[in-house]
Image (cartoon, rainbow, N blue to C red):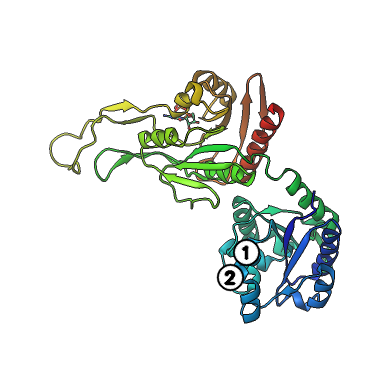
């Protein structure tokens, strides 16, 4: 499974850095070619010589070394790897990864790379629990970085709690799993819609809604992380375009519908956008002015239902069509009715009542409704919902083939 793979091992400065030597040894024994980058702080804990002896390769550490640049620059180091493993991932390197800081070879290689990244965090429990680290971990997970551990127990600083580097065997198992099943959706095409639509009333005003696009964007990231070629069709949102995903920007429901049609054929369609149900029949060509008689009356017409259309698109229908149901009451019953009415395969029903607090928030409580079976998922982050949904999609295709 691991034989012939290439891993770029990044070893930052943490007390658990010595365990990277054991990981490198086990990887080498499994047939992996390990190239290592040792940060300046990492070299205070393990020597370049011991890492070079174990990997049988030159160890890289200096961004500005001219000979290294000509032999193998940071771009090439990152490009040639099948997987980048950061261990022990200190609070410092995780923060730099989350914020795109590139001030040494390790962080520059990480920023210059579009390869999958795995990080095994290790730090003091208070650093791990600090809101800054929590936010960085959420950012990294949303970007598809695979996190292994940390474990709980006695820490090097003498305190007890979470923050211990995962066992080397567990990191090895995560790497093996990644290569065994990390890309189960390779060869499949997924279309995801996300965010709101804006329906113009005049050149400056529109009808819209509170959707942030966080859930749809997280789903696109998770599907791409499982190897699917992913087209994200996004309404106007503040979320950045996810890396590794082709993002098409749209404004109105009609533009979104046209972009979905243009992206077909697909194996998977996840319609997570909060599409406006109505648009102005005739948007005013110039700004509507106040103080010119009565308040204007809006005449609305219904927008096309993209989910219903794609569910009934005959030969062009994707193999698995998934809709979302935003409900404020009787969430499961209304979700199940919507599944039937729209003709999709699965519905992810969520409570968007004020008490649910979903819009714009990082959390979501959902129910996955399929024909004859409903799963109630516990409250989790939108990234976790996305990961779990992508795993369920992969399991669906694995069972079908
Ligand atoms: N949807 C769509 N096109 C529309 C309206 C909705 O593709 N014009 C999709 C959404 O992306 C979502 C699902 O349909 O996957 C359900 O959307 P929701 O707003 O919850 O339901 P509605 O169909 O709008 O029904 P209602 O507003 O009556 O609850």
The image position of residue 152, as x and y in percent, is: 81, 56
How crowded pointer 2 is (Cα within 10 Å; few <14, some 14-19, many 20+) is rated as some
Looking at the picture, tell me which residue is in the foreground, 134 or 316: 316
Instruction: Please give the residue where the numbered disc 1 appears in the rendered image.
Output: 110
Instruction: Please give the residue where the numbered disc 2 appears in the rendered image.
Output: 102
Looking at the picture, tell me which residue is in the foreground, 210 or 103: 103
Q: Is the CB atom of the residue marked by disc 1 within 8 angstroms of ligand 1's nearest atom?
A: no
The image position of residue 271, as x and y in percent, is: 51, 33
In the image, 400: left or right of 311?
Answer: right
Examine the rendered structure and indicate whether residue 155 appears above or below residue 44.
above
Mark 1 vs mark 2: which is more N-terminal? 2
**Quarter of the C terminus within the rendering:** top right
How crowded pointer 1 is (Cα within 10 Å; few <14, some 14-19, many 20+) is rated as many
Q: Quadrant of residue 292?
A: top left
Direction left: furthest residue = 292
Looking at the picture, tell me which residue is in the foreground, 370 or 85: 85
Task: Give the SS element for disc 1.
Answer: helix
Q: CA distance from mark 1 to mark 2?
A: 8 Å
In the image, 214: left or right of 163?
Answer: left
In the image, 386: left or right of 1?
Answer: left
Task: Give the SS element for disc 2.
Answer: loop
The residue located at (50%, 42%) in the rendering is 231
Please tell me how many numbered marks the rendered image carries: 2
- Residue 65 visible to the viewer: no
**Disc on res. 7:** none
Q: Quadrant of residue 319?
A: top right
């Amino acid at each position: 499974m691991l034989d012939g793979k290439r891993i770029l091992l990044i070893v930052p400065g943490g007390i658990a850095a010595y365990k990277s030597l054991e990981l490198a040894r086990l990887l080498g024994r499994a047939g992996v070619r390990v190239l290592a980058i040792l940060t300046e702080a990492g070299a205070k804990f393990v020597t370049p010589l011991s890492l070079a002896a174990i990997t049988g390769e030159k160890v890289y550490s200096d961004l500005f070394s001219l000979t290294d640049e000509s032999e193998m620059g940071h771009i090439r180091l990152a490009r040639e790897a099948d997987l980048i493993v950061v261990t022990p991932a200190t609070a410092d390197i995780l923060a730099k990864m989350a914020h795109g800081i590139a001030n040494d070879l390790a962080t520059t290689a990480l920023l210059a790379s579009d390869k999958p990244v795995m990080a095994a965090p290790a730090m003091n429990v208070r650093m791990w629990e600090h809101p800054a680290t929590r936010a960085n971990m959420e950012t990294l997970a949303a970007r598809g970085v695979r996190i292994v551990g940390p474990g709980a127990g006695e820490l090097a600083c003498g305190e007890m709690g979470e923050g211990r580097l995962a066992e080397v065997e567990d990191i090895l198992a995560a790497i093996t799993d990644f290569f065994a099943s990390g890309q189960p959706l390779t060869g499949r095409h997924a279309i995801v819609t996300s965010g709101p639509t804006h329906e113009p009333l005049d050149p400056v005003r529109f009808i819209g809604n509170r959707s942030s696009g966080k859930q749809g964007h997280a789903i696109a990231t998770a599907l791409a992380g499982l190897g699917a070629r992913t087209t994200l069709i996004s309404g106007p949102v503040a979320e950045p375009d996810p890396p590794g995903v082709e993002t098409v920007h749209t404004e109105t429901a009609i533009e979104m519908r046209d972009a979905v049609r243009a992206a077909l054929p697909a194996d998977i369609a996840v319609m997570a956008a909060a599409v406006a149900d109505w648009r102005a029949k005739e948007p005013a060509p110039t700004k509507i002015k106040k103080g010119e008689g009565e308040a204007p009356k809006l005449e609305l017409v219904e927008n096309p239902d993209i989910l219903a259309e794609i569910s009934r698109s005959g030969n062009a229908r994707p193999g698995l069509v998934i809709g979302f149901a935003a409900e404020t009451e009787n969430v499961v019953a209304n979700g199940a009715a919507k599944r039937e009415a729209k003709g999709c395969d699965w519905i992810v029903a969520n409570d968007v009542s004020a008490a649910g607090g979903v819009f714009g928030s990082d959390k979501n409580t959902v129910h996955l409704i399929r024909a004859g079976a409903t799963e109630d998922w516990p409250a989790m982050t939108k990234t976790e919902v996305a990961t779990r949904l992508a795993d369920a999609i992969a399991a669906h295709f694995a069972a079908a083939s």
